[in-house]
Each structure stands twice: as structure tokens, then as C-alpha cells.
């Protein structure tokens, strides 16, 4: 799909103007010791291409999408967040245990937080600009 994403990496698409989402990206970067993840805002060209390719309704899914270029698949909402957690070190990877919970329960909690994220954590006027040290981990 996107030749910019190496096959051995996963791409996390996130809401670039959401303070909670930006903090979550920084959390992942700090714990992603093997650089398994790359990042791009949903609002970026890469984000728009993936949204279009997978015909994603952004009114229903507007926060996190995990793209696996090797399998050319996506996960979203709680499944994406927990699959990211699974690839991070201890103790964050323990959160993957919640993948055994039914999707509708996990996504109910996820949607509740996503719906209130701007109210609780605030919103930026523009997408996050990564520092020069982190720029290689971000696509457009």
C-alpha cells in the first residue's frame, strides 16, 4: 500500500491535534526500544491514503488505526491500542490480556474515552511536529 512504511514496521495513525493521542505516541516511542512502530497523523497524506484504501468512515473511527504493511491490514480502536501495547516492553505488554475481552466491551470503553478526549485533555490547533531526533519515525 505505502512504500514509505517498511514491511518490518507497523504504522500508527493517530489524531494529530489530540493532546491525549500525542501523549500516547510519545509514550509508545519511549517504550518502543526496537523501533517497531512508525507514526503519521490521520490528517496527513499517508493517513488519508490508508483511510481511503480501507474505506474507513472517520465519523466512526477517528482516533487510532494500526496499519500492518506486511499483511496489508488494519486494526482500529481498542484492538489497535492493545496490539501496540503487546509489542512494547514489560509492564505495558501485559495490557494485551484485554484482547480476550469481547470487542464490543473493549470498544465501548475506548469510544467513551475517545468521545471525551478533547474535553478532558484538550486539542491543538495543528498536528504535532516531531523533534529532529524523532523525525525519522514519522511519515509526512
Image: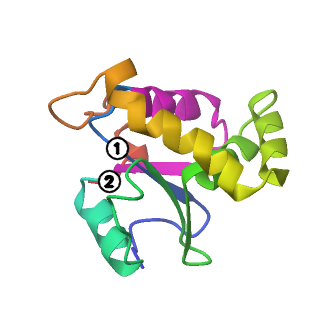
* Whole-percent x, y for residue 23 in the image: 45, 26
Q: Residue at x 69, y 41 (%)?
A: 85
Q: In the rendered image, which quarter contains the C terminus? A: bottom left
Q: As drawn, which residue projects farthest toward the left?
A: 125
Determine crowd level at label 2: few under 14, some 14-19, many 20+ residues with C-alpha closer than 10 A. Answer: many
Q: Are marks 2 and 1 in contact (CB under 8 Å)?
A: yes
Which residue is label 2 attached to? 42
SS at mark 2?
loop
**Left of 54 or right of it: where is 9?**
right
Determine the secondary structure under disc 1: loop
In front of the other: 83 or 8: 83
Residue 7 or 91: which is nearer the viewer?
91
Q: In the rendered image of this protein, does residue 53 appear above or below residue 106? A: below
Coordinates of residue 80 in the picture (x, y in percent): 60, 53
Which picture quadrant has residue 103?
A: bottom right
Residue visible at 42% across and 77% down in the picture: 54
34 inside magenta stretch: yes
Q: Is residue 22 visible?
A: no
Toward the viewer: 24 or 110? Answer: 110
Horizontal side, residue 51 vs residue 97: left or right: left
Q: Which residues are magenta?
A: 20-41
- Tell me the residue that label 1 is attached to: 15
Amino acid at each position: 500500500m505505502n512504500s514509505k512504511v517498511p514491511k518490518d514496521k507497523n504504522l500508527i495513525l493517530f489524531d494529530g491535534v489530540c493532546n491525549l493521542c500525542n501523549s500516547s505516541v510519545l509514550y509508545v516511542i519511549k517504550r518502543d526500544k526496537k523501533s517497531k512502530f512508525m507514526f503519521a497523523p490521520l490528517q496527513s497524506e499517508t493517513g488519508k491514503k490508508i483511510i481511503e484504501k480501507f474505506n474507513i468512515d472517520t465519523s466512526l473511527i477517528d482516533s487510532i488505526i494500526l496499519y500492518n504493511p506486511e499483511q496489508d491490514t488494519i486494526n482500529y480502536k481498542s484492538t489497535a491500542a492493545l496490539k501496540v501495547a503487546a509489542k512494547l516492553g514489560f509492564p505495558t505488554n501485559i495490557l494485551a490480556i484485554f484482547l480476550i475481552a469481547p470487542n464490543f466491551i473493549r470498544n465501548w470503553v475506548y469510544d467513551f474515552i475517545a468521545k471525551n478526549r478533547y474535553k478532558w485533555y484538550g486539542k491543538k490547533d495543528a498536528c504535532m511536529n516531531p523533534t529532529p531526533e524523532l523525525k525519522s519515525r514519522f511519515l509526512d
